Image (cartoon, grey):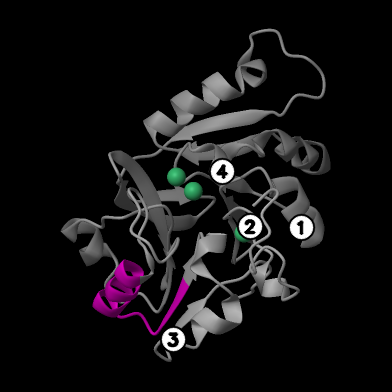
Amino acid sequence: MIGCRCEVCRSLDYRDKRLRTSIYVETGNQHFVIDTGPDFRQQMLREDIARVDAVIFTHAHRDHTAGLDDVRAYNFLQNMDMPVYGNAATLTQLKVEYAYAFEKVSYPGIPRLTLNEINDQNFTVNGVTIIPLPVKHLHMEVLGFRFGNFSYITDTNFIPDETLVKLEGTEVLVLNALQREKHISHFNLEEALAMAKKIHAKKTYFTHISHKLGLHAAIEKEFPANVMLAFDGLTI
Ligand SMILES: [Zn+2]
Ligand SMILES: [Zn+2]
Ligand SMILES: [Zn+2]
């Protein structure tokens, strides 16, 4: 947190240096980014990512969308418009926040985006089948995504039964765990641990972690063997 002097924000452990939540998925010859938060550019530079075939959004909160302008680097590199996937509410919000990218008369250097609306039905991107996992983030519908045996759910405090069915057989699960105290729109640590137990993946990683959760090294000691805290740069 900007200006914070707490032990997590001052920690020298690299696992306590948390940028905004996002993942990069490699499957077959395809490379997807899920969410482009304000740290998108920094994350792509840090991980030296030279290819993005599509951007897929969970929801339109700024901590997940504010870095979208920087996909223009991939427009130049790949000489193509960037396919963007999101539900109707997300795409509507993107058109507001990035109005300049959707003007009739284009200006050189703006990000070139192709919007693709998705809903709770499975969809395919360049031959890769992706299963949306609808969840509730207070009143907002957020989409998690399943690729094969990997499921990714961020920003929720309620997973409906229909989505729990879609999660069956997941081997690696990523789930949000914001902090210890109860929160209006995210699972807290206790709720995330209970949900991890219920879904029962072989491995569960917690993400979307606030500085209020505590030090990585200390928190992880409390977990069962199949639950871990994710950290920036983690490769699975
Ligand atoms: Zn802090
Ligand atoms: Zn959110
Ligand atoms: Zn968020």
Between tags 1 and 3, which lies in front? 3
Q: SS for tag 3?
A: loop
* Kind of element beneath mark 1: loop
Name the residue located 44 percent from the left edge and 50 percent from the top edge.
124
Residue type, numbered disc 2: His
Q: Element at badge 2? A: strand
Q: CA distance from mark 2 to mark 1?
A: 9 Å
Q: Nearer the viewer, residue 234 or 26?
A: 234
Q: CA distance from mark 4 to mark 3?
A: 28 Å
| Of callouts 2 and 1, the N-terminal one | 2
Tag 3 or tag 4, which sits nearer the N-term? 4
Disc 1 to disc 3: CB gap under 8 Å: no
**Residue 5 position by quadrant:** bottom right
Provide residue 59's location: percent of width, then percent of height: 44, 41
Residue 175 or residue 177, whichever sits in front: 177
Between disc 2 and disc 4, the foreground one is: 4
Q: Nearer the viewer, mark 4 or mark 3?
A: 3
Q: Quadrant of ligand 1?
A: bottom right
The stretch drawn in magenta includes residue 199? yes
Residue 222 got which mark? 3
**Residue behind mark 2:** 31
Mark 4 C-beta to ligand 3 under 8 Å = yes
Q: CA distance from mark 1 to mark 3?
A: 34 Å
Could you tell whether 147 is left or right of 190 in the image?
right
Magenta residues span: 190-205
